[in-house]
Image (cartoon, grey):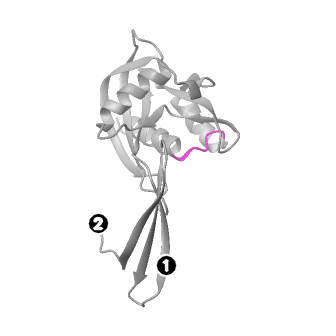
Amino acid sequence: MTGKRPFALLDREKKYSGKIIDLTVDRIQYSSGRIAVREVVEHPGGAVIVCLFGNDDILLVRQYRHPFGQDVTELPAGKLDKNEDPLLCAQRELREETGYGARQWEKLTALYATPGFCNEVLHLFLARDPFLHEAGQALEEGEASLRVQRVPLKEAVAMIERQEIVDGKTIAGILLAERKRANQ
């Protein structure tokens, strides 16, 4: 969906360029004449995978997340490389994080993670007919704490309800997968 920008962009300054994100500060002017500042975190986006087995189990990963100082239960996911196709990213991340591949892939949706200040788009995929990949897992150094869990889809929904799963992309992916299974 597109809309008309309700302000004039006066200037834009990149304040920070990092490994994962950039920070841009925009100075804008509303039609009232009021000047405001908008800070925008620029992120290349990512892919999120609901890996669904024939018995309705899914794969979750549990890993330490520094911003929260605790382990977080999530769907396998990862950052898009520059100009990378989201499906190829999803296939790579599923293998790297879990050691699995999948024979069937379907895009569930794309979502804006935090549209108030960040341009990150997450592409959610349903991966069916999984198999253990011959190359196995390929964890990055920062993923050493990652643990793979195979959980029934219904139990994953219950984990959301018990607030054991609080990650937004994971909640969206699990609930979309559950809805898709219920409609088949």
In the figure, 143 relative to 11: above or below? above
The CA span between labels 1 and 2 is: 22 Å
Question: Which residue is drawn at the image coordinates 40% and 13% (left, top)?
Answer: 133
Q: Is residue 76 left or right of residue 106?
A: right
In the figure, 152 relative to 1: above or below? above
- In which quarter of the view is residue 61 placed? top right
Residue that label 1 marks: 36
Residue 177 in picture, x, y percent from top left:
42, 37
Viewer-side residue, 49 vs 11? 11
> Range of the magenta residues?
164-168
Residue 156 in picture, x, y percent from top left:
56, 34
Please report contact status of discs 1 and 2: CB closer than 8 Å, yes or no: no
Residue that label 2 marks: 2
- Asked whether residue 68 is in view, the answer is yes
Mark 1 or 2: in front is: 1
Question: Which residue is drawn at the image coordinates 60% and 42% (left, top)?
Answer: 160
- Label 1 is placed on what type of residue? Ala
Residue at the extreme bottom of the image, as rendered: 32
**Structural crowding at the residue carrying mark 1, measured as other residues with C-alpha within 10 Å and reported as few (<14), some (14–19) or many (≥20):** few
| Quadrant assignment for the N terminus | bottom left
Residue 3 in picture, x, y percent from top left:
30, 71
Q: Secondary structure at mark 1?
A: strand
- Label 2 is placed on what type of residue? Thr
The tally of labels here is 2
Residue at the extreme right of the image, as rendered: 69
* In the image, residue 77 lies in the stretch drawn in magenta: no
**Structural crowding at the residue carrying mark 2, measured as other residues with C-alpha within 10 Å and reported as few (<14), some (14–19) or many (≥20):** few
Q: Earlier in the sequence, mark 1 or mark 2?
A: 2
Q: Secondary structure at mark 2?
A: loop
Q: Main secondary structure of the magenta part?
A: loop
Residue 167 in picture, x, y percent from top left:
57, 44
| Quadrant assignment for the C terminus | top left
